[in-house]
Image: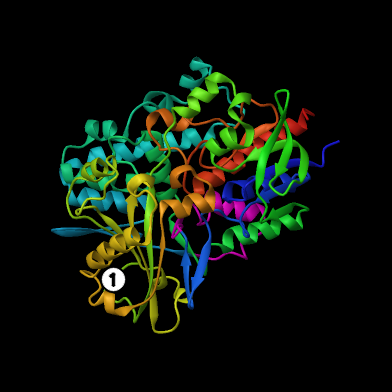
């Protein structure tokens, strides 16, 4: 007899979502997390009185009706977590102008149409297509058989038509102005891809989760969200083992029957769910000799997303120089050039950067009379062989110099400094090469082409940004919900 109904490896946001929903159904669920706290990238840290969120600064789908809002409603946590709406959501700074972006889709479309009156029809049509794709993908049940082409094309016509195309392909058909194309593509950077590479399905997820239910920050630290979910999970009878790392997913025949921890403990479960890096799941925890050759080849051909270098600063004084908390700064009107440098493991002098001021929204992040800043570059894991202090100092100085154009005397105002590199992210999450969003959202790895929740092993499931729909907090919450649905269906049918 198994020790528990379900074992979940990794207590990131998808694992927590999945675990909570299964525990709510009455299943006995155990989560195992190698870090001392839950949440994965959705975590926070403190340094000398300043609070910093590791990598999640704002979230979509938190306002009433959104996916995260609905999850918290199911878990009776709406009164426990408070969201601060961001409107406008952000500002984009270019060499010759500044563009403010609304978090409301209709306002956003109106603003773009007023800037480009001849292109209004195309702008409306692009967002109508993205909305349809997002709605279709959100409606796909976990049990759907992707290998029935006729039912797929009739039931999901937009996914069928655009599933293999890039967002750049879509733009080509509807708008002409190069700068408008840039503004319409600008949030492809949240998948760390240019419009010429990101899939339309991937872009639909990014845009619609952002515009459908607004953009928000969590009041206080972002880690309150997973922490409260963990508390709810325990109240439902769930068990979380923190500070313990899984060494092996035990396979017997073609079934996952449990896990072995690095400290020697073994637990058995009727179902095992992996919420960690897919490459680690199969290559490290299971072993390639157990994996069917076709699946092994598929895994080896898949490409992780890029990563970030993030500089966290605690500074003296307020930040009245910035009109909003979320800013992105560009030095040229060409998104592709940055990625050409990144493909060579380089960061160009003209590379754009993020300039975030979390304490403008959350005053609790800094002591009175002080502020927090997060400056970051997109980067690759292989930009540096070891990410030593010399490399970090060089990137930090570049970011501080560029940010000083917006915040005078920034260097003299710095009180606290800390950094996160792709190597840090890899160590914290086990994401291969510090991938920020699981697999890159290119057409062959998006939508129906992403890894499925089921695996070649009966009883073993996946959840998180390595499976559909992809990265971002709303995306991994959706993945957790779909995996829970698939696993619960198995228990309902008595297929243990």
Horizontal side, residue 33 vs residue 60: left or right: right
> Where residue 247 sits: x, y (%)?
66, 42
Looking at the rendered image, the quarter that the C terminus falls into is top right
In the depicted view, which residue is nearer to us: 302 or 137? 302
| Point 32% across, 67% down: residue | 324
Secondary structure that dominates the magenta span: loop
> Where residue 121 sits: x, y (%)?
24, 39
Q: Is residue 218 above or below residue 345?
A: below
In the depicted view, which residue is nearer to us: 245 or 325? 245
> Where residue 215 sits: x, y (%)?
43, 57
| Point 34% across, 36% down: residue | 198
> Where residue 232 sits: x, y (%)?
70, 58
Badge 1: residue crowd in 10 Å (few <14, some 14–19, many ≥20): some
In the depicted view, which residue is nearer to us: 206 or 67? 206
| Point 47% across, 37% down: residue | 135
Horizontal side, residue 362 vs residue 287: left or right: left
Horizontal side, residue 333 vs residue 327: left or right: left
Looking at the rendered image, the quarter that the N terminus falls into is top right
**Residue hosting label 1:** 322
Q: How many marks?
A: 1
| Point 77% across, 27% down: residue | 495
Q: Which residues are magenta?
A: 55-83
Q: Is 65 part of what is drawn in magenta?
A: yes
Asked whether residue 65 is in view, the answer is no
Q: Is residue 371 above or below residue 95?
A: below
Asked whether residue 348 is in view, the answer is yes
């Amino acid at each position: 007899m198994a020790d528990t109904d379900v074992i979940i490896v990794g207590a990131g946001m998808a694992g927590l979502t999945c675990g909570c929903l299964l525990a709510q159904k009455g299943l006995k669920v155990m989560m195992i997390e190698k870090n001392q706290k839950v949440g994965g990238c959705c975590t926070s840290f403190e340094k000398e009185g300043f609070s910093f969120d590791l990598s999640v600064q704002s979230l979509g789908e938190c306002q009433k009706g959104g996916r995260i809002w609905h999850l918290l409603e199911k878990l009776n946590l709406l009164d426990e977590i408070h969201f601060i709406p961001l409107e406008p959501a952000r500002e984009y700074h270019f060499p010759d102008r500044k563009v403010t972006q609304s978090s409301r889709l209709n306002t956003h479309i109106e603003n773009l149409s007023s800037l480009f009156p001849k292109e209004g029809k195309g702008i409306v049509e692009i967002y109508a297509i993205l909305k349809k794709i997002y709605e279709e993908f959100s409606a796909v049940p976990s049990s759907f058989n992707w290998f029935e082409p006729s039912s797929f094309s009739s039931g999901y016509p937009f996914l069928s038509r655009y599933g293999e195309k890039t967002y750049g392909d879509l733009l080509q058909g509807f708008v002409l102005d190069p700068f408008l194309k840039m503004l319409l593509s600008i949030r492809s950077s949240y998948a760390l891809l240019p419009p010429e590479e990101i899939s339309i399905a991937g872009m639909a997820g990014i845009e619609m989760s952002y515009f459908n239910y607004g953009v928000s920050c969590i009041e206080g630290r972002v880690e309150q969200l997973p922490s409260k979910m963990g508390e709810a999970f325990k109240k439902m009878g769930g068990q979380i083992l923190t500070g313990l790392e899984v060494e092996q997913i035990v396979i017997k025949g073609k079934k996952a029957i449990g896990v072995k921890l690095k400290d020697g403990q073994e637990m058995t479960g009727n179902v095992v769910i992996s919420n960690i890096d897919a490459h680690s799941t199969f290559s490290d925890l299971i072993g390639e000799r157990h994996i069917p050759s076709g699946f092994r080849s598929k895994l080896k051909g898949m490409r992780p997303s890029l990563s970030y270098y993030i500089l966290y600063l605690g500074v003296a004084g307020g930040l009245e120089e910035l009109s909003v908390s979320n800013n992105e700064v560009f030095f040229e009107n060409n998104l592709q050039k940055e990625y050409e440098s990144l493909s060579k493991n380089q960061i160009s002098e003209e590379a754009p950067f993020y300039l975030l001021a979390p304490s403008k929204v959350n005053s609790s992040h800094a002591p009175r009379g002080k502020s927090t800043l997060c400056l970051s570059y997109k980067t690759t894991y292989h930009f540096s062989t070891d990410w030593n202090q010399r490399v970090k100092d060089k990137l930090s100085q570049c970011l501080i110099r560029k940010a000083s154009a917006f915040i005078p005397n920034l260097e003299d105002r710095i009180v606290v400094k800390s950094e996160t590199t792709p190597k840090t992210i890899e160590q914290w999450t086990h994401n291969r090469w510090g991938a920020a969003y699981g697999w890159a959202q290119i057409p062959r790895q998006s939508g129906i082409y992403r890894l499925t929740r089921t695996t070649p092993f009966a009883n073993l499931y996946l959840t998180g940004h390595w499976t559909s729909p992809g990265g971002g907090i709303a995306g991994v919450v959706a993945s957790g919900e779909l995996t829970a649905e698939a696993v619960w269906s198995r228990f309902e049918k008595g297929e243990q």
